[in-house]
Structure formats: C-alpha cells, structure tokens
C-alpha cells in the first residue's frame, strides 16, 4: 500500500497531491505518509477564518459551543481506534496513546462542562463587579470579555499530535475564535486523521478549524492585532518565533509553552523505609518511560539527599532494568522508539554533552536488543540514568536537555540546596516534591513556585489518585516562567479568557446592564402584577422585579429559629454579652434573615420555578435587631439557557435572582444571588 499524501485544509478545501517529505514509522522506518509539495495561500486562509469562521462561531453562543464540544468529544470517543492505529506509527505504546488520544478527548469533555457551568448565554462575558463611579449612583463601570475577531494560530510539537491540538482548540472554540492548527510535521499524519474526523462530523461551523501540513511560510507575517499565536515546542524555537517583527509591530499576543529541565526532589525527611521513597523512584521511571521521555514535562533532574544517593541509584537501576523497549505493536513492550531518526540523532548529540560531565548509573540496551523486527531501522533509544556528583559546579546539567529517556541524579546536602539546584533550570513547567512533612511542603512549595508553573506534592495519600508529575490537567494551569516560555495554557476558564478581549464599560446602570446582559443594581426595573416566579424561562425578562411586603423581627422569631437550628450563639441569646459587643444588643441570626426574606418573596404554589440550587455572593451587611422591619426585593439578574431537558423531556434554564434585604431605614442588611432552575413553556 502506497503511503498517502497528507493534505492541508484551508479556506474550506482539502488540497495537496504532490508528495514532498516522507514521514516514516518510528519503529520500522517504513514510509507511512508524505507531506504535500503545494504552497498554501495563507492570505486566503486568514480571510476565510476572519470572515466565515468568525461569523459561524458567533452565530452560536457560549452555551451552544459548549454543547458542540461535548458532542465532538463523544464522536471522537466512538472513532478513537482509528487514531490509535496511526498513533502506533509515532512510536507510542497503547498507554502513551491513551494519554494523547483519550487525554485530548477528556480535555474536550472538561471544557464542555466548564462552558456549560461557568459561561453565560450570548457572547459577552461580564467580568464584574460593577463599581460606582459617581456619588449618586448614576454612573458606574465594569468589565466585559468578548470574542476576538481574528484567528488563533496553534503551533504544536510532535510528541502529542492529538492532545496538542485539542487542548488548544477546546478553549479557543469555546471562546468563539476560529483557529489554524499547525502540527509538527513528523507526526502530522495522526493530526490529519484527527482533523478529518472532526470536519467530517459536520458539527463545526465552516472556517472554525483549518489545518496546515508542512511549513507555515509567511503566515506569521500576515497576522494582525486581532489574531493570537500559541506555541508548544522547544525554548529555542519559541524565542525565534516570538521575535517575528510583524508580531512585535502589530502587538499579536504570543503564548509559549516550552520544554524545560523539570526537577523531582526527594525531601530530606523521606527515608528508605518510607513508601514515598519507592513512589518517588516510580515517578522518575514513569517519566523516562512514557512517550520515551519525549515530554516537555518529563523529569530531567532528580534531586536526592546525598545520604540516600546509593540506595536511590540501586532502586532506579532495578526498575529501569525491567523496562522492555521495542516496537509498541509487539506484546510486552513498555517503551517505544523516539519519533524519528532525526530525533534519535538529536538525543545522542545532547546526551554526548552530558556524558562529558556526568557518570553513568544505568544504560539500557547495552546488548543492542530491542523487541522489534529490525531495530536498526527504528528510532530506538534505551533509558539512560546519569549522575552529576558536583551539580553546583557543572552548568551543563541545568542547561542541556536531552529530549528522550534520560535523567540525571543530583545529590544535595540540605533542602535549601535542593531548591537552589531546581532554580538553576531557569524556569520549568513542573516540579515534584516527595515529602511526608507538612512544614517541609509549605516551605518548599512557596520557594519552588517562583520558578515552576506547577508543583506536585507527592506522598502516600496523594499517590493513590495522583495523575502524576508529567500530566497537565484541564483544570490547572500548564506553563512556566523563564525557559519554560512564560506562558499559560489550560487552567480552566483562564485558557478561554486568553482568546477574549477585555474592555472596560462605563455608563448609567441601565446602559451597563444592557451591555453586560444582566441586571445591575440601580438600573431600571420591570415591575408587573405577575409574580416573577410565575413566569416560565422564555417569558422572564432581565430586570423583572418584585418588592415584597414587610415583616417585623421579634424576640419570638429569634428564639424559635435558635430552637429549630440549634444555633444558640451568644449574640442572639445572651443580653449581657451582646450589650458589651460592638452591636450593643442582641441581634437576629443572619440565616434567619435569609429564611425570612425567602418567606417574603417565594410564591409557594407549584409553578415554573423547579428548584433553588445555591446562593452566590452572600453578605450580611448590617445587623438586624429585635424590632427591626425588613423588606426584600427580588430581581431577575441573569438567564442562562443550557439547552437541557429533564427526564420527561421538558426544557429548563438557569435563572439567577438578585436579592436585596433592607430595614425600615432603607439600609441594606443582606445581599445575595439565588440560583434556580426554571421550566420552559411546553409548546405543542
């Protein structure tokens, strides 16, 4: 079977027929694909993304795009075996492929859930609070986040052809920004297979995802201030791209996540008899084995107390000796080859620099045996563990990265030495600290956080569920300072915000409310004879409001609430102690005020409001004393249509209600938002 010519997908079309560079199977050296020779029209691709792509994405709102992400994740799950077949060609074992493929799909699911739970309907994200800018409440200000009207260029590394695309695509798509994906050429056949599945599905708006196979040509020179560049790869390449004159001149945001010399520190309190000692060794070996050490988060420097150096060396030797290296399609293989022959040559070259200044603790493959049909044709590299006895005197161990299954042991004498050595990496994505001591963790993490984007504190308790040193998670920031690129990816909604433009908005409360899409205190309200709780989701208007009747708080109320709740705090029941307090007398329970307010505004009969599932921004502003009279105002603040139905197929949406509770002097005593599920109209 002839190796196919991979195609780019730009300006709505697949193109490329003439073969150019040959791409080979990492294990066998057999050609699996070719890049195409035709030069892309990047001007047309950018026009397509900025026009068709932007229009298509903004025809959907945040909630609808979250739904599309979820549906896409389900589709890719159904077709994942197609991706696994291509993944084996990259040298990935099944477990390596799981991280790449199902880790990428899991990221789609995660951002779908975040979008559904945290983003509004519409395409304006209000980043409050609203702040008064005038003395009489007629002039206020706030911030909004809106989708950019440009294209995100996602440049990815060779090691994670699926996850690398999806972890960037998910937040940019959710933000409403079309993207052009540029995978590393050597494993782009897997990314092309992924993109074909995504586009064939038909659920992505036209122009929302484009693909470049091969060189980016003059693409960077054509970007403008509405566009964004995200990059994953080497620190050297990140520095080169960041310096592009056009990006600098036009202020194009550039976010880099670069490989780094990550550390693992075995704290001085961990002894050979502790579980953490073995767990630490497992973490080091795992990071050498997974993806054959070809990870920007892999452990390159292993910091061990000098008193435990011999024991740790022997433990690591034993664990590394058990690894079987070979073609991942052979049963029993633990670690596959490097991505290609060029990567193999680079690993050998960089390893040579370290071997000049380090001794060898373990060198796998000395007998030349790899579990493969023809080891010479593959890009195999055996695991290698080095030792640098004088890590403060040898700079190479803190500067030279071998992007493969190689780690270096660095002995230290006290914890401050270990932290200083970790900092010599000049900025890293992640560090692991194995410790049993709480004070050690608190001290070391604060120090290490200055130089690392993420810190894993490893102990026996965490190990049972830990995702490990090298696994970035959608909910947590991925990125690091200095050499690691200085950028941030993932991190929950932080990644979505990266693709949105922040703007300050000033005006009257009514105008600002219209802009941000939610009620702002001081804005005009809508008061009708129909109780807001009697209206279905579609009929509710932002600003619909109810001013309740009044209620005077009595001593009997306080006594009864204390008896029901069991809350006999002295401020409610001890007249002498209360008189000596700043309040001067007994006061009502804050939660009584909350409950009494609910009694004032709730419409008790069955109706569209299905459930109250939470409170936000609750503040007790002033005390309520015996004899005070309270009154509540309930206002529809925000509506979110999540396009969901209940078990009976009836639609429902989320409504947030602004609640103000005031006393007889019109002073605010309590303030909060209530979150409710509200039924939609049942239409024939």
Image (spheres, rainbow, N blue to C red):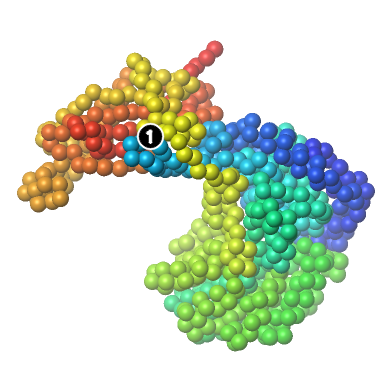
The answer to which of 113 and 328 lies nearer the viewer is 113
Q: Quadrant of residue 334?
A: bottom right
User: Is 483 left, or right, of 46 in this rendering?
Assistant: left
Residue 386 drawn at (x, y percent):
66, 80
Question: Looking at the image, which residue sits at the far left?
Answer: 576
The answer to which of 341 and 515 lies nearer the viewer is 515
| Quadrant of the image containing the C terminus | top right
104 versus 462 height, above or below: above
Residue 238 drawn at (x, y percent):
70, 62
Question: Quick one: label 1, few (<14), some, or many (20+) residues within 10 Å?
Answer: some
Residue at image coords 59%, 49%: 498
The answer to which of 361 and 257 lies nearer the viewer is 257
Residue at image coords 33%, 36%: 136
Q: Secondary structure at mark 1?
A: loop
649 versus 472 height, above or below: above
Q: Which residue is mark 1?
A: 138
Residue 670 drawn at (x, y percent):
27, 38
Can the viewer see residue 63? no
The answer to which of 639 and 314 lies nearer the viewer is 639
Question: Looking at the image, which residue sits at the far front?
Answer: 135
Residue at image coords 50%, 57%: 465
Q: Quadrant of residue 379?
A: bottom right
Residue at image coords 27%, 29%: 632
242 versus 670 height, above or below: below
User: Is 465 left, or right, of 660 in this rendering?
Assistant: right
How many numbered marks are there?
A: 1
Question: Looking at the image, which residue sits at the far top?
Answer: 684
Residue 214 drawn at (x, y percent):
82, 53
Can the viewer see residue 544? yes
């Amino acid at each position: 079977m002839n190796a196919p010519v991979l195609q780019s997908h730009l300006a709505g079309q697949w193109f490329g027929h003439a073969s150019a560079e040959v791409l080979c199977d990492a294990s066998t050296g057999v050609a699996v694909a070719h890049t195409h020779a035709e030069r892309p029209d990047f001007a047309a691709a950018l026009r397509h993304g900025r026009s068709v792509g932007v229009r298509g994405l903004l025809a959907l709102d945040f909630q609808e795009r979250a739904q599309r992400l979820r549906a896409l994740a389900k589709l890719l799950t159904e077709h994942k075996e197609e991706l696994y077949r291509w993944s084996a060609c990259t040298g990935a074992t099944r477990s390596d492929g799981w991280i790449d493929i199902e880790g990428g799909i899991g990221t789609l699911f995660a951002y779908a859930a975040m979008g559904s739970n945290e983003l509004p309907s519409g395409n304006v994200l209000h980043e409050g609070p609203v702040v008064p800018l005038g003395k009489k409440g007629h002039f206020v200000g706030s911030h909004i986040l809106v989708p950019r009207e440009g294209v995100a260029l996602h440049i990815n590394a060779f090691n994670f052809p699926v996850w690398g695309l999806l972890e960037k695509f998910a937040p940019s798509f959710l933000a409403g920004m079309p993207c052009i994906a540029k995978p590393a050429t050597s494993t782009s056949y897997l990314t092309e297979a992924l993109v074909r599945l995504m586009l064939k599905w038909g659920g992505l708006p036209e122009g929302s995802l484009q693909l470049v196979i091969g060189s980016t040509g003059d693409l960077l020179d054509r970007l403008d201030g509405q566009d964004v560049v995200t990059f994953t790869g080497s620190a050297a390449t990140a520095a080169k791209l960041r310096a592009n004159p056009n990006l600098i001149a036009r202020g194009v945001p550039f976010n880099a996540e670069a490989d780094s010399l990550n550390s693992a520190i075995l704290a001085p309190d961990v002894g050979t008899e502790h579980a953490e000692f073995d767990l630490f060794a497992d973490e080091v070996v795992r990071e050498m084995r997974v993806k054959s050490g070809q990870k920007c988060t892999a452990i390159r420097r292993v910091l061990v107390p000098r008193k435990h150096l011999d024991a740790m060396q022997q433990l690591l030797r034993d664990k590394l000796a058990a690894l079987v290296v070979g073609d991942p399609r052979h049963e029993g293989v633990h670690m596959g080859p490097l991505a290609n022959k060029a990567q193999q040559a680079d690993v050998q070259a960089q390893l040579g620099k370290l071997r000049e200044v380090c001794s060898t603790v373990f060198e796998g493959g000395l007998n030349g045996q790899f579990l493969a049909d023809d080891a010479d044709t593959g890009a195999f590299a055996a695991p290698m563990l080095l030792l640098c006895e004088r890590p403060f005197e040898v700079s190479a161990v803190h500067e030279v990265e071998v992007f493969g299954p190689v780690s270096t042991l660095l002995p230290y004498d006290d914890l401050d030495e270990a932290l200083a050595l970790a900092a010599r990496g000049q900025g890293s994505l992640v560090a692991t600290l194995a410790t049993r001591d709480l004070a050690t963790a608190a001290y070391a993490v604060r120090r290490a956080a200055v130089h690392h984007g993420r810190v894993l504190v490893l102990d026996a308790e965490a190990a049972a569920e830990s995702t490990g040193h090298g696994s970035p998670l959608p909910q947590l920031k991925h990125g690091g300072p200095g050499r690691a690129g200085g950028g941030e990816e993932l991190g929950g909604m932080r990644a979505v915000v990266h693709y949105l433009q922040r703007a300050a908005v000033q005006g009257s409360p009514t105008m600002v409310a219209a802009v941000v899409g939610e009620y702002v205190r001081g804005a005009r309200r809508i008061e009708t004879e129909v109780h807001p709780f009697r209206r279905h989701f579609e009929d509710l208007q932002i600003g619909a409001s109810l001013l309740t009747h009044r209620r005077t708080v009595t001593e009997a109320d306080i006594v009864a609430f204390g008896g029901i709740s069991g809350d006999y705090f002295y401020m409610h029941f001890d007249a002498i102690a209360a008189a000596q307090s700043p309040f001067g007398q007994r006061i009502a329970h804050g939660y009584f005020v909350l409950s009494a307010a609910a009694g004032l505004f709730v419409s008790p009969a069955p109706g569209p409001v299905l459930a109250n599932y939470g409170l936000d921004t609750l503040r007790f502003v002033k005390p309520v004393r015996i004899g005070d009279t309270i009154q509540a105002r309930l206002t529809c603040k925000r509506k979110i249509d999540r396009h969901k139905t209940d078990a009976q197929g009836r639609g429902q949406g989320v409504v947030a209600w602004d609640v103000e509770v005031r006393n007889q002097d019109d002073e605010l005593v309590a303030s909060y938002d209530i979150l409710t599920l509200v039924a939609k109209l049942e239409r024939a």
